[in-house]
Image (tube, rainbow, N blue to C red):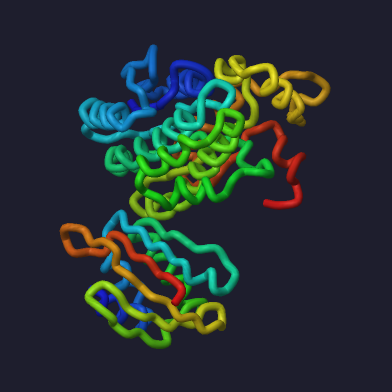
Amino acid sequence: MIEKYLDAMMNGDYTTLATLFAKDCIIRDCSPMLLGQKAKTICGRPAVDMLYHHKFVYGLTRAAHGRKCSETTADLFMIQYGMYITSVVTIEETDRDGLIHRLTIRPA
Amino acid sequence: MKTCAITGASSGIGAATKQVLQKKGFEVFNIDLKDGDLNVNLATKDGRAAAIKALHEKYPDGLDALICCAGVSSGTAGASLIAAVNFYGATQILTGCFDLLEKKRGFAVAISSNSITQPGTPMHMVDMFLDVEDEDYVMKAIGDVTPENAHSIYTSSKYALALWVRRHAPSWAAYGVNLNAVAPGNVETPMTNALDEVSRTMMSALPVPTRYGTDKILQPDEIAQPVAFLCTEEARGVCGTVLFVDGGNDALLDGGRL
């Protein structure tokens, strides 16, 4: 699943990205803190779809490079608002269908 | 006939909302500690589970609206009860009944408070409510809050509830359920009538522009009408909003921000 996540992020494919998540998923994204912003929490698969659609199309977020570290973690190098950010992505929990229920993005 | 479940409709804003909705043709089911159609204690996990189960049994085809109005204040309750009812009592009922709302493309409203914008709201407590999913852990931490600081738990629980609504509203809307919050100002209710003298003095010093020249505060019906509106198709375009219904208090005290 972490590989599918990385592929979707690298390709800017918000539609596929959303399908990896459970209906009641939670993404806790702490990477904006590196830019002096607050951490963001995204709740629900449609929100993942809509928000990443917005971020990718507006060029607010772009994954420059991703590296799988384990079955549940990856390093993700992103460009957000023009700034280069390194993060660690962790699939904290999946549901019984194997979809991501909880994902955390921490600044590296 | 449209159906609506309300927590805390035995008195105050909830009771007024029930009346407004009944006049609009809704069948209203009241869940409260007493004098309800179902009497449960929403401060407890068992109480919330019983409420969710009862609603599923009574409305298997879905709910048109759900309003979480049950709440307690620092003038009448300690920190733990405030947290348990105001935040968990609302969010868990909403989460537990989402499927019923989804069936009917229903509307959900959580009652927050206009006190959330007051300076001094402990944001670390707001974050704890929102991001620490272990209720027992949070309740244990809140257990250390002294009675004098219970108001900080009131504002943080209501703030967290408003943010919880905003976090979940977009996805809920994608599934056809409109979720919003209403932030009432001070209202003449049993809760505010039971405040201690210090709290009442503080409350009277909060201006209500629509009541300028009097010492009166808002009436429950003034809150009930907007809440009921948010449960109708006319409000389908309203999503994830925290609607301040406080007679202009927040605009006066903090009109420099949105």
| Residue B123 in picture, x, y percent from top left | 57, 49
**Residue B191 or B231: which is nearer the viewer?**
B191
Asked where in the image residue B179 lies, by quadrant, the reply is top left
| Quadrant location, the N terminus of chain B | top left
Q: Residue at x 32, y 67 (%)?
A: A18
- The reply, left or right, for residue B250 in relation to residue A77 is right
Residue B2 shows in this picture: no
Q: Is residue A12 left or right of residue B23?
A: left
Query: How far from the left and from the top, in percent, is residue B242?
Result: 56, 43
Which residue appears at 64% of the width and 17% of the height?
B196
- Extreme residue toward the left, this view: A96
Residue at image location 56% in from the left, 19% down from the top: B191
Vertical arrangement, residue B248 with respect to residue B18, above or below: below
Please give the count of numbered marks on the rendered protein.
Answer: 0
Percent position of residue A10, x then y = 36, 83
Whether residue A10 is visible: yes
Q: Which residue is the extreme one toward the top? A: B35
Q: Which quadrant holds residue A23?
A: bottom left
* Residue at image coords 47%, 73%: A55
Q: Foreground residue, B109 or B236?
A: B109
- Residue B194 located left or right of residue B234: right
Q: Residue B27 at what x, y percent from top left? A: 36, 22
